[in-house]
Amino acid sequence: MRPSKIKPALAQLISIGQPVFLWGPPGVGKSQVVAQTAEELNLGLIDIRALLLDPVDLRGLPHISDGRACWCPPDFLPRDGKGVLFLDELNAAPPLVQAACYQLVLDRCLGEYRLPDGWQMIGAGNRENDRAVTYRMPSALANRFVHIDFDVDADDWQAWALDNGIALEVAAFLRFRPSLLYAFDPQKDEKAFPTPRSWEFVSRIVEMHPSAPPDLELVAGTVGEGAASEFCGYLRIFRNLPDPDQLLASPETAVVPEDPATLYAICELLSVKADIQNLPRILSYAKRLPSEFSVLLVRDAVRADQTLIQTQAFNEWAAEYADVLL
């Protein structure tokens, strides 16, 4: 399931109090989707890394009260309010820790402790075939969850990148080479490989020195040698593009490149500059592009600023490209 569909699915399951488990490879954003869902629902979030716990950490330490042994629940378990108790990397925890979660997940209690009614549980972990550190989840625990497989989706990632300040160079490159957004082969012994998480690291590296090319070995240490070579080559194209203000100064006569890589880069540059004032000039240039790139440019511009669809210029462009948009 793509991330844009996972969030409403989580919201629905949270509303009925159903525990859910997200399965997915490393670095694809499972934890972020859970955090975003909790924030959008105005819920608190407690993130518990299960693999760091011992069984006694969940049950708590015993103490004597009126001659009987009682258990002191750990401080990280909620006592009031509403929120999401997120058991991250649950299947990376040793079997005894997973067994300690049985009662918490199914009965919402651990000994004398009871999970407040306003709190719901979500688990997440890597798949067994991803070569991550995992233990097979016992069937008794697995049967307590609704299971959702997390799929990487290039369009969803681009929307996230726009909202989270990912470097334009990185976003444009992954428009051009979407297959490199996630390229992990568990059969290969690679320490660095492309994932949404590692491309976010590359974005930070690029933004450290926006006018200088990043060190190829540094990028290779983030996303692997093959993806790093392609990205650094693309970066040379991106940084030799004409100033977008020059394109908008003469949209009817400005050069329209034929190379797809360059077209992707120009669309990315112009889409982030679009506003109500310059939209007519941007659309004038967009109409000279191949139709798929014209749609890409305008779609990204509207994604960044929804007010653009209320303009006459947009409506005229949409009418002209209605057959492509359908």
Image (cartoon, rainbow, N blue to C red):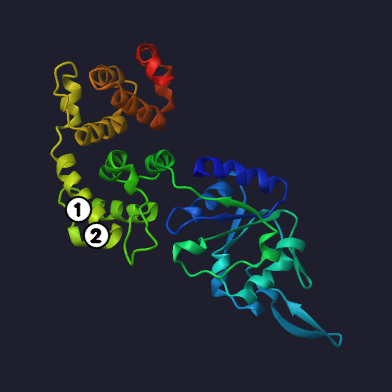
Q: Disc 2 marks which residue?
A: 220
Mark 1 Cα within 10 Å, few/some/many (few <14, many 20+)?
some
| Distance between the alpha carbons at the discs numbered 1 and 2 | 8 Å
Q: Disc 1 marks which residue?
A: 229
Quadrant of the drawing holding the C terminus: top left
SS for dot 2: helix
Res. 325 mark: none
Nearer to the camera, 30 or 132: 132
Residue placed at 18% from the left, 58% from the top? 216
x then y, percent, for residue 3: 50, 44
Q: Quadrant of residue 12?
A: top right
Q: Quadrant of residue 104?
A: bottom right
x then y, percent, for residue 306: 43, 26
User: Is 303 situated left or right of 115 in this image?
Assistant: left
Q: Amino acid at mark 1?
A: Ser
User: Is 62 situated left or right of 303 in this image?
Assistant: right
Residue farthest along the right direction in this orientation: 66
Residue 244 lies, with reference to residue 204, above or below; the image says: above
Residue 95 lies, with reference to residue 182, above or below; the image says: below
Residue 209 appears in the figure: no
Residue 111 lies, with reference to residue 121, above or below; the image says: below
Q: Decide: marks 1, 2 in contact (CB < 8 A)?
A: yes
SS for dot 1: helix
Residue 187 lies, with reference to residue 177, above or below; the image says: below
x then y, percent, for residue 95: 62, 74
x then y, percent, for residue 233: 17, 47
